[in-house]
């Protein structure tokens, strides 16, 4: 839980938005069990209905879709913290998929 809080804090530091009113953040991890043309695991992060981050397990890279005026140093720190959170989510979803596939 601490890793997720750290990731959310770093996301707030890199995305410039108006500080009044309410906002929403959505994280959509997707795990596909079996052979497909799509990545086995991917994550899309949306802030106020705009995609700000994307992760693809095939290339193992977190792609920022935020405004290019954000500082490079903050973005590097965000990527370092996100790696461990992404691995935890991936391992959890993979274990659950294996349990579901081998439920007999």
Image (cartoon, grey):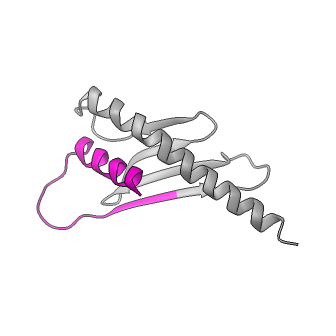
Q: Nearer the viewer, residue 82 or 68?
A: 82
Q: Based on the picture, tell me whether residue 102 belongs to the magenta stretch.
A: no
- x then y, percent, for residue 100: 76, 67
From this viewpoint, which residue is outermost toward the bottom?
104
Segment colored magenta: 1-28
Eyeballing the image, is 31 above or below 64?
below
Q: Residue at x 34, y 54 (%)?
A: 5
The image shows residue 68, relative to residue 104, as above or below, that is: above
Residue at position x 69%, y 63% in the image:
96
Q: Quadrant of the N terminus?
A: bottom left
Q: Quadrant of residue 94?
A: bottom right
Is 90 on the left-hand or right-hand side of 53?
A: right
User: Residue 63 placed where, x, y %?
Assistant: 44, 37
Pick the front one: 19 or 101: 101
Q: Position of residue 66 (x, y in %)?
A: 32, 41
Residue furthest to the front: 2
Q: Identify which residue, 10 or 57, lies in the foreground.
A: 10
- Is 75 or 85 nearer to us in this picture? 85
- Image quadrant holding the C terminus, namely bottom right
- Quick check: 50 left or right of 28? left
Place of residue 48 in the rendered image (x, y in percent of width and height, measured from the top left): 30, 60
36 with respect to 16 (left or right): right
Q: Residue 13 sits in which quadrant?
A: top left
Q: How many marks?
A: 0
Residue under the point 28% across and 27% down: 73
Q: Is residue 78 above or below residue 11?
A: above
In the image, residue 2 lies in the stretch drawn in magenta = yes
Does 37 sit left or right of 76 as displayed? right
- Residue under the image location 61 percent in, 56 percent down: 92
């Amino acid at each position: 839980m601490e890793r997720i809080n750290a990731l959310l804090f770093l996301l707030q530091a890199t995305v410039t938005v108006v500080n009044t009113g309410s906002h929403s953040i959505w994280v959509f991890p997707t795990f596909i069990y079996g052979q497909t043309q799509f990545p086995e695991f991917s994550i899309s992060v949306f802030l106020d209905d705009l995609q700000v981050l994307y992760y693809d397990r095939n290339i193992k890279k977190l792609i920022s879709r935020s405004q290019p005026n954000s500082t490079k140093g903050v973005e590097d720190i965000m990527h370092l913290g996100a790696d461990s959170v992404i691995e935890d989510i991936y391992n959890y979803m993979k274990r659950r998929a294996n349990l579901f596939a081998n439920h007999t």
